[in-house]
Image (cartoon, grey):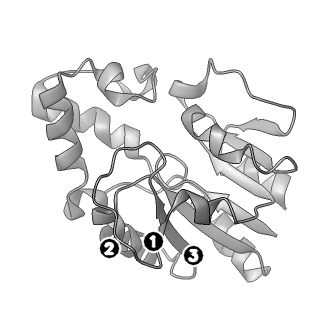
Amino acid sequence: MNIYIDFDDCICETARHFSGLVKDMFGIDVPYENINFFDLQKSFSLTDQQYQEMMVEAHKPEILLSYAETPGAGETINGWIQSGFDVSVITGRPYSAYKASRKWLDEHGLSDVKLYCLNKYGRDGFYKSEDHNLELEDYYKMHFDYAIEDSPHAFKFFEHLPNLKVLVFDRPWNKDCTLPRDSYTRCPGWKEIKSIVG
């Protein structure tokens, strides 16, 4: 069994942290429940400059390491690995965030999980050729049975796998999106994800 897992807002509570970060940095109060768009600049009504400042701050190693684990993530993922499943975390975080992201996983008992950076959203201009960085053509050669993802913008990366079962982690910014096909299932949390995958 091969499983794809997105990092932010599937394994850790990134958007909840961003809500507090934006309030501290700019005095803009948007509760987590009101983050209605995956586009955080739009959700927080940030200027271009504010958005850039927020993204720089949010990707500092000490900030990345402070994100809270999504309840049930570590226990479920480790259970899959112990059952012989092949688990890959494929994140849209930039290459510069790899070391802190790897450390976060290790510190949360997920040292056996593979971690790859994939430029999902065209936001990173400094990717380097490393084993843990995926070019799109390499990603499209990979096979997965299940994918766990929160971003509707990432659904296009699953079109080459017609038999893939996509478990959409229920978040405010995807609550109104139309799921592309019957193989997509909305899941409130890791308990429900575990019950589907096994």
Name the disc covering residue 99, or none: 2
Q: Is residue 81 left or right of residue 23?
A: right
In primary-sequence order, the first of circles 2 and 3 is 2
For residue 182, side relative to residue 46 (left or right):
right
- Give the CA distance from mark 3 to mark 1: 8 Å
Please state, as top left, top right, bottom left or bottom right, where the N terminus lies in the image. Answer: bottom right
Give the residue at mark 1.
Answer: 105
Decide which of 175, 153 is in the foreground and name it.
153
The residue that mark 3 highlights is 113
Q: Residue at x 84, y 51 (%)?
A: 196
Q: Which amino acid type is marked by label 3?
A: Val
Does residue 26 appear in this view? Answer: yes
Q: Secondary structure at mark 3?
A: loop
Image marks 1 and 2: residues in contact by CB distance under 8 Å: no
Q: Mark 3 vs mark 1: which is more N-terminal?
A: 1
Q: CA distance from mark 1 to mark 2?
A: 10 Å
133, above or below 164, in the image: below
Query: Does residue 65 appear in this view?
Result: no
